[in-house]
Image: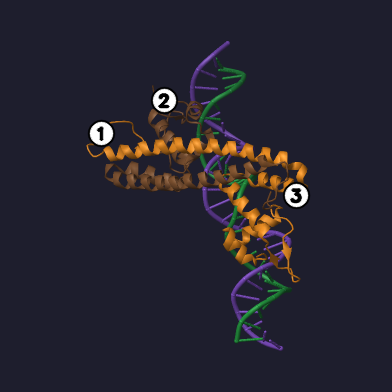
Chain colours: A orange, B brown, C purple, D green
Amino acid sequence: MSGYAPSEAARRSGFSLDTLRYYEKIGLLADVERTAGGQRVFTDDDLGWLVLFRCLRDTGMPIAQMRRYAQLARDGEHTTDERHELLCHHAAQVEEQMRLLQRQYDHLREKIRFYERLPGTAPGSEAG
Amino acid sequence: MSGYAPSEAARRSGFSLDTLRYYEKIGLLADVERTAGGQRVFTDDDLGWLVLFRCLRDTGMPIAQMRRYAQLARDGEHTTDERHELLCHHAAQVEEQMRLLQRQYDHLREKIRFYERLPGTAPGSEAG
DNA sequence: CTCCAACCTGGAGCGCGCTCCAGGTCAAGC
DNA sequence: GCTTGACCTGGAGCGCGCTCCAGGTTGGAG
């Protein structure tokens, strides 16, 4: 139920071993358990954090901000407001990102349609 | 109607002067006109390319691929099929990107809802 | 007990896409 | 003609997020 070897944690989270170590080194993932010999043992809790980090990373949050969030969470319950705000702020940025992406996707589709209206070698702007 | 100073081209395209020079240096933007003294003069056509580059860049196309596209366009009309294919391939990637972004945005929203169901300090997974 | 794959550490290196710099040139306004 | 700000070049540097490496340790299978 809990206690995963590094390779297993990597497999489950989709992050590389190096990335897991890196995330611990920079303080994103804190207090990862160790065996007597010093090898890491990831818990379900760690895996939960990794899922969250993947979500935030995939939506473009910079690592510094993830670090801040993780630190707030470690600081205790009196930081929930700030964490909430941080996520809301990020969500707004993601919405903006989605709008931009949709807009540029539409442009791209239009460009593609231009090629599909060929041949006939129609007129129109350059930048083909 | 055509013939823009670098600063004007930068303003209109939203790229920095350095980026415009960089794009020319790496062969994205080719054959930019010059004054007798060697200063760049951007045409409407160049601006058109810049708009396209912004579209492709905003949708995550690597510069190497944009370069390839630009080169194909310079190579003439017999490359339209290949250009079309390149854009279609990219559009498919953008669609995938949008799906992922939407999915992770939904996760994020759920996480935010968790904070909004507080206080009461509900149970639930860690990774708060 | 031996083997070997998986793991450890600190630190260097990389790929991308710019961004900045020094030292010099150009050109529009006075 | 002089000033001044925009522009030129080649090349170094940067910020991000990993990724790789050397050299050593651990720990489960046989």
Residue in view at x 51 percent, y 31 percent: B14
> In the rendered view of the protein, which quadrant contains the N terminus of chain B?
top left
| Identity, as a three-letter code, of the amino acid under mark 3 | Arg
Give the percent coordinates (x, y) of residue B74. Answer: 34, 41
In the rendering, which numbered label is found on residue A122?
Answer: 1
Q: Secondary structure at mark 2?
A: loop
Q: Residues within 10 Å of mark 1 (few under 14, many from 20)?
A: few
> Can you tell which of label 1 and label 2 is closer to the viewer?
1
Please give the residue where the numbered disc 2 appears in the rendered image.
Answer: B3
Q: Is residue A92 above or below residue D14?
A: above
The chain containing the residue under callout 2 comes to B
The chain containing the residue under callout 3 comes to A
| Identity, as a three-letter code, of the amino acid under mark 2 | Gly
Q: Is residue B31 visible?
A: no
Disc 1/disc 2 C-alpha distance (Å): 25 Å
| Identity, as a three-letter code, of the amino acid under mark 1 | Ala
